[in-house]
């Protein structure tokens, strides 16, 4: 279980408790948080669950696999150093308090 | 005035995404999502892959857990079927006899697999694959082992052949056309796919047809007889020969149909209170200059959002870039755009190493790309196609030795 904060482009935020096992993507979908599409269902193929990890984050996130890195080359909003695919971020107790920023568009 | 009411007929990807998109846009009226199947709305792509292969269970495919529908105020009406639309009264009658009134109706009725009318097609062990029930029956049948015969060399048939090989079955694919996935792929990519199936031990028979299926004493299929008279072992036969859009409900209500339920650029049918989306809808594409009916998650999901926007009073024409994917063995094939009708194909990357893309052009203009294990290429081409105007990448530039899309993209993003 982890508390995750999804910050919307308009400055508002949604905070939800996401049980494990899950992903940050699925936590958003389950709570119908606008701005996460995840058309491929979480297989790092479509780039429509793009998030920016909060700049101040110190929580441990898994390293990026090559396929995630590749997909981030073509996201609808520009890639930044803190870009991730939220389908590749498992929800564990260790990321309790994670803050992610949602991009303006996914597709 | 009471908040308007939306009824969505069809609880597949398109229907379920419409309900979610309406709520995330702040729609406050009633939403009823009607689905014929008992199961919660689920993702179909894994059926032919992870689910049949045994690495995913039905529950893993659910789009959302049951609690999400309650939390979002979406009335799920599962295990029931819309049998009639009354457009004058704006209501839908269900098989159970209940009647749902709507202000806006969304038809997301999907499609159903074709079956070829060959003698013996009614034998036990002759199947199609569309829904979870089909997949469950097929999964059971695959456990018996033996020889799988797939009729049709398209997405579903080839994924199935790949899964069967993983499970240790013998597999034969019979395709009437001259090459695999001919509707979706360039000849070069078709050949690559064919070579991989052959390498994996699948027998691929092109330009061949099944003339008849023969069963054993218990009425179970055992042998397929091909057009030339050749007999192929077949303990399990699956037709993967395309689908027919489910238009009957719409046609009976007087809506215009023809190769799908006909809609305008805003995905409205000939009755402006009724939208049609996903596999069942035939829409005019400004991008491709013709009418299209697409069978893909992308199309279902993007059309769902487009219809939801229109219902919420924020209509935009549907212009999303189509894309498709399939996974067979270790091949992850992604298609950006619609490459059919190209007059020039340029291969980039490392075909020998199994990581490359075929960029398809028509009259010098980029139509799309087919990528094998090159997700960055796929994503970049989607971005090039979705940008305003004509994509600037020329075939000459793409054919330049050492051309690399990642490098091209980063160069384009540099401010001049």
Image: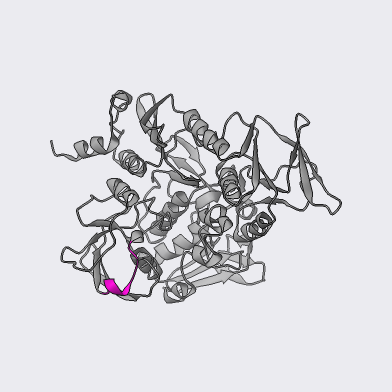
Q: Is residue B304 visible?
A: yes
Tell whether position A92 is magenta: yes
Residue in the picture at 61% in, 39% down: B202
Residue in the picture at 38% in, 35% down: B356
The front one of A37 and B304 is: A37
Which residue ends up furthest to the right in the rendered image? B217
- Magenta residues: mostly which secondary structure? loop
- Quadrant hosting residue B90: bottom right
Relative to B209, is B178 on the left or the right?
left
The front one of B379 and B363 is: B379
Q: Position of residue A43 (x, y in %)?
A: 41, 55
Tell whether position B331 is magenta: no
Residue B33 in the image: above or below residue A76: below
Q: Position of residue B316 (x, y in %)?
A: 36, 50
Q: Which residues are magenta?
A: A89-96
- Quadrant hosting residue A61: bottom left
The front one of B398 and B142 is: B142
Residue in the picture at 32% in, 49% down: A66
The quarter of the image holding the C terminus of chain B is top left
Q: Is residue A15 visible?
A: no
Relative to B192, is B384 on the left or the right?
left
The quarter of the image holding the N terminus of chain B is bottom left
Residue A25 in the image: above or below residue B349: below
Q: Position of residue B312 (x, y in %)?
A: 38, 61
């Amino acid at each position: 279980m982890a508390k995750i904060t999804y910050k919307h482009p308009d400055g508002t935020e949604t905070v939800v408790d996401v049980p494990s096992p899950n992903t940050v993507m699925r936590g958003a979908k389950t709570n119908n948080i606008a701005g996460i599409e995840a058309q491929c269902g979480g297989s790092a193929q479509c780039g429509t669950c793009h998030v920016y990890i909060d700049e101040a984050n110190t929580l441990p996130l898994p390293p990026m696999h090559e396929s995630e890195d590749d997909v981030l080359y073509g996201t609808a909003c520009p890639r930044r150093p803190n870009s991730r695919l939220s389908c590749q971020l498992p929800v564990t107790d260790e990321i309790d308090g994670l803050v992610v920023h949602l991009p303006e568009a996914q597709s | 005035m009471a908040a308007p009411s939306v009824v969505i007929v069809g609880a597949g990807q398109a229907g379920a995404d419409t309900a979610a998109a309406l709520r995330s846009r702040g729609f406050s009226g009633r939403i009823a999502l009607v689905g014929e199947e008992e199961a919660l709305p689920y993702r179909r792509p894994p059926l032919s892959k992870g689910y049949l292969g045994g690495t995913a269970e039905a529950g893993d495919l659910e789009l959302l857990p049951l609690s999400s529908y309650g939390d979002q105020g979406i009335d799920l009406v599962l295990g029931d079927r819309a049998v009639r639309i009354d457009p004058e009264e704006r209501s839908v009658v269900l098989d159970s006899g209940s009647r749902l009134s709507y202000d806006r109706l969304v038809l997301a009725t999907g499609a159903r697999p074709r079956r070829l009318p060959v003698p013996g097609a009614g034998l036990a062990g002759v199947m199609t694959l569309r829904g979870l029930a089909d997949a469950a029956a097929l999964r059971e049948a695959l456990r018996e082992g033996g020889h799988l015969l797939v009729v049709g060399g398209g997405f579903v048939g080839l994924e199935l052949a790949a899964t069967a090989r993983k499970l240790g079955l013998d597999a034969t694919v019979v395709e009437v056309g001259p090459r695999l996935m001919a509707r979706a792929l360039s000849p070069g990519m078709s050949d690559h796919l064919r070579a991989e199936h052959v390498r994996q031990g699948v027998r691929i028979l092109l330009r061949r047809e099944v003339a008849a299926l023969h069963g054993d004493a218990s009425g179970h299929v055992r042998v397929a007889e091909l057009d030339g008279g050749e007999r192929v072992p077949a303990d399990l036969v699956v037709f993967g020969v395309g689908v027919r859009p489910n238009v009957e409900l719409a046609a009976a209500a007087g809506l215009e149909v023809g190769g799908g339920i006909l809609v305008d650029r805003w995905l409205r049918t000939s009755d402006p209170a009724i939208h049609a989306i996903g596999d069942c809808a035939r829409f005019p594409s400004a991008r491709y200059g013709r009418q299209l009916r697409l069978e893909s998650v992308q199309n279902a999901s993007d059309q769902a959002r487009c219809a939801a926007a229109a219902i919420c009073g924020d209509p935009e024409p549907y212009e999303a870039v189509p894309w498709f994917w399939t996974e067979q063995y270790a091949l992850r094939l992604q298609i950006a755009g619609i490459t059919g009708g190209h007059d020039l194909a340029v291969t980039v990357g490392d075909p020998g190493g199994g990581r490359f893309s075929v960029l398809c052009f028509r009259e010098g203009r980029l139509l799309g790309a087919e990528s094998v294990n090159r997700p960055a290429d796929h994503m970049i081409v989607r971005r090039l196609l979705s940008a305003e105007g004509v994509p600037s990448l020329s075939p000459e530039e793409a054919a330049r030795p050492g051309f690399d899309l990642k490098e091209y993209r980063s160069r384009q993003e540099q401010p001049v």
